[in-house]
Amino acid sequence: MERKQHIAIFTTASLPWMTGTAVNPLFRAAYLAKDGERKITLVIPWLSLKDQKLVYPTNTTFSSPSQQESYIRQWLEERIAFVSDFHIRFYPGKFAVDKRSILPVGDISEIIPDDEADIAVLEEPEHLTWFHHGKRWKTKFRLVIGIIHTNYLEYVKREKNGRFQAFLLKYINSWVVSIYCHKVIRLSAATQDYPNSIICNVHGVNPKFLEIGKKKYEQQHSGNQAFTKGAYYIGKMIWGKGYAELLKLLGDHQKELACLEVDLYGSGEDSDQVKEAAEKLKLTVRVHPGRDHADSLFHDYKVFLNPSTTDVVCTTTAEVLAMGKIVVCANHPSNDFFKQFPNCRIYDDGKGFVEATVKALDEEPAPLTEAQRHELSWEAATERKLVFLTPQTLKLLFNVRFKMKKVIPGLWEGSLNLRKETDAVVAGDVDTIAAVVMDLFSFE
């Protein structure tokens, strides 16, 4: 019996911390293992009890890795409709309070035996390798793919001496990622650019939100009013997560938006300041504690206001579209993936924000087609991801990009559309890529 290809997914967080680098790699592992054609191992941090109390929700701690694994698997089983056979392994981690991040301790690549070191997927490769000491990832694994989740430079710019710190961090990130990764997937153009990188959204949406969207579609189809509430925003309540931009837009345009009522949901370090700023507005802006976005409380809202520009691909925006709502968001690279959906309303400035918001509140959302639902799903995200997990495809792809740059450098550098078309082909099937390549160049 032929040995199955082994894919090890290393990430920087784990449930019950409800952050993107805990949730998305978990779904990725489940869906990659779904067809049983490959062996999947999800490698996540194990924290001391002291650190667990700092990171995880109140009264949620674990005495052993096996106890936490049971929690994670139960959470997943409640959200997917199939049994997924993948392994979970833990590496020692330490919570850095100043960075609000979990950092790996020691050489975590050793978690995977050498004879199973086929492919490593590093979720946030810069984060995982800032302090890595041990065997080089590219020496250990035949193929190492980094997935860039976070726009670290944007966050750092907002701190004291931010521009200088961002300048240094940019070069540190480029250095460690080029050392440890063969190829890099950027979820959107909102991230730092890296050599040998491709832009492709390889994230999907929690299936729960697609189910909510189907129920809303049935209500619309039967002639019932599906959305009875107005506008809202949900996100971790820190200024860098869009609250500063949203409250400024509302404050600058109170006259034009006099009839608007907005509900803000979130918990975080800046909750008191956000509430204080909201109370100063003449508009009705209610501030509430954070809730699970799948809660029935949110089902009837029609419009999601999201001016954030620090995200790479905003998870809540994907969830909103999956639920059949309208989202009003900034014309920013982090939102490029969502522009294909009719319920995504893009604005360029304050005037555009007002127009898009008023129009969204007056209209009914367009029902999602089956193709649009699929595009948001983890099935589609996994299809896009699998293209990158074939070494032959990777070699083919990057040969194309290299030869395009070499043969027609002026056209390549000057044409954003050409680069976008190449990246778009990457998200397609292997045969399409091969056809494009053979049409342009001769390969041995």
Image (spheres, rainbow, N blue to C red):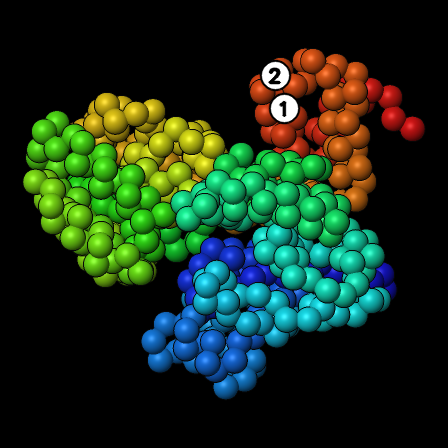
Can you say whether 3 is above or below 254 in the image? below
User: Residue 344 appears at what percent x and percent y?
Assistant: 35, 32
How many marks can you see?
Answer: 2
Q: Nearer the viewer, residue 309 or 61?
A: 309
Q: For marks 1 and 2, give the CA distance.
A: 7 Å
Please give the name of the residue rendered at 74% of the width and 21% of the height, measured from the top-left corner: 405
Left or right of 205, for residue 222 = left
Q: Nearer the viewer, residue 309 or 3?
A: 309
Q: Quadrant of the N terminus?
A: bottom right
- For numbered disc 1, what is the local secondary structure? helix
- For numbered disc 2, what is the local secondary structure? loop
User: Residue 316 appears at what percent x and percent y?
Assistant: 37, 48
Q: Nearer the viewer, residue 36 or 162?
A: 162
Q: Amino acid at mark 1?
A: Arg
Q: Quick check: marks 1 and 2 in contact, CB under 8 Å?
A: yes
On the image, numbered disc 1 is attached to which residue? 419
Hey, which quadrant is residue 117 in on the image?
A: bottom right
Hey, which quadrant is residue 314 in on the image?
A: top left
User: Residue 257 appears at what percent x and percent y?
Assistant: 13, 31
User: Residue 311 appears at what percent x and percent y?
Assistant: 44, 44
Q: Please tell me how crowded label 2 is: few (under 14), some (14-19), or many (20+) other residues with Cα within 10 Å.
A: few
Left or right of 127, for residue 291 = left
Please give the name of the residue rendered at 30% of the width and 34% of the height, measured from the top-left corner: 328
Can you say whether 437 is above or below 390 in the image? above
Q: Amino acid at mark 2?
A: Ser
Residue at the bottom extreme, as displayed: 63
Can you say whether 374 is above or below 332 in the image? below
Please give the name of the residue rendered at 43% of the width and 35% of the height, measured from the top-left corner: 335
Q: Would you say residue 274 is visible in this rendering?
A: yes
